[in-house]
Image (cartoon, rainbow, N blue to C red):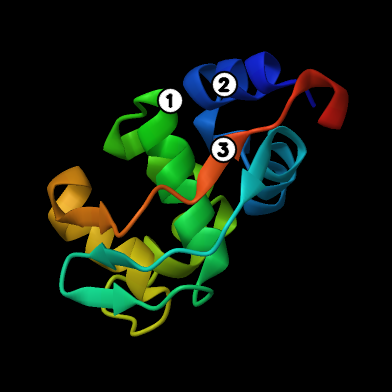
Amino acid sequence: MQLSNFLLKLSNTPELVEFEDTISVIDRFYHYSPAEFINGDLTNKAGQNAGSCKIFAFGKLHGLDERAVLACFGRYYREDVLAHPSGKDHLNIRNFIHSGWKGVSFDRLPLSPKEPSDS
């Protein structure tokens, strides 16, 4: 999927976005280098929770609002978190719901755009 098509899907039909699609687009268009990040009261060491790290970095790079970032988590957000609000799984999603962008920081940005010939 092209990056522009993914961003349109995210904007127009966020309920159809799946985690795997998000990660596939990120991996296709960005180089990932593990980085430590903080999300609310949760500290993730470099290499820990790489999917969340990639999604939050992607959201920062594209200026996504909280709703769009949460949609990037697909069914993990819709089925696991929203359907079970008192659950203890998916702590990065749950923390982001409460703290939003103000709670997210990186020791360095973990994504850098690939050259067109790389993707």
Q: Nearer the viewer, residue 66 or 57?
A: 57
Q: Position of residue 17 (x, y in %)?
A: 61, 38
**On screen, residue 79 above or below 61:** below
* Residue at numbered disc 3: 112
Left-right relation of 76 to 66:
right
Q: Which residue is the site of mark 2?
A: 7
Q: Could you tell me the amino acid type at mark 3? A: Ser
- Give the residue type that dot 2 points to: Leu
Give left or right: position of 6 versus 94.
right
Residue situated in front as seen by the camera: 101 or 85: 101
Residue drawn at (33%, 36%) of the image: 67
Which element is circle 1 on? helix
**Can residue 34 be seen in the rendering of this structure?**
yes
Which quadrant does the N terminus fall into?
Answer: top right
Q: CA distance from mark 2 to mark 1?
A: 9 Å
Do the CB atoms of the residues marked 2 and 1 lie less than 8 Å apart? yes
Mark 2 vs mark 1, foreground winner is 1
Task: Give the total number of marks visible in the rendering.
Answer: 3
Marks 3, 1: nearer the viewer: 3
Residue 119 shows in this picture: no
Quadrant where the C terminus sits is top right
Check disc 1 and give the amino acid type.
Answer: His
Q: Residue at x 30, y 30 (%)?
A: 65
User: In this figure, which residue is indicated by the disc labeled 1?
Assistant: 62
Residue depicted at 48% across the width and 69% down the height = 80
Q: Residue at (24%, 54%) from the top-left corner?
A: 105
Q: Give the percent coordinates (x, y) of residue 20.
A: 71, 52
Mark 2 vs mark 3, foreground winner is 3
Q: Residues within 10 Å of mark 3 (few under 14, many from 20)?
A: some
Q: At which x and y percent is residue 106?
A: 31, 56
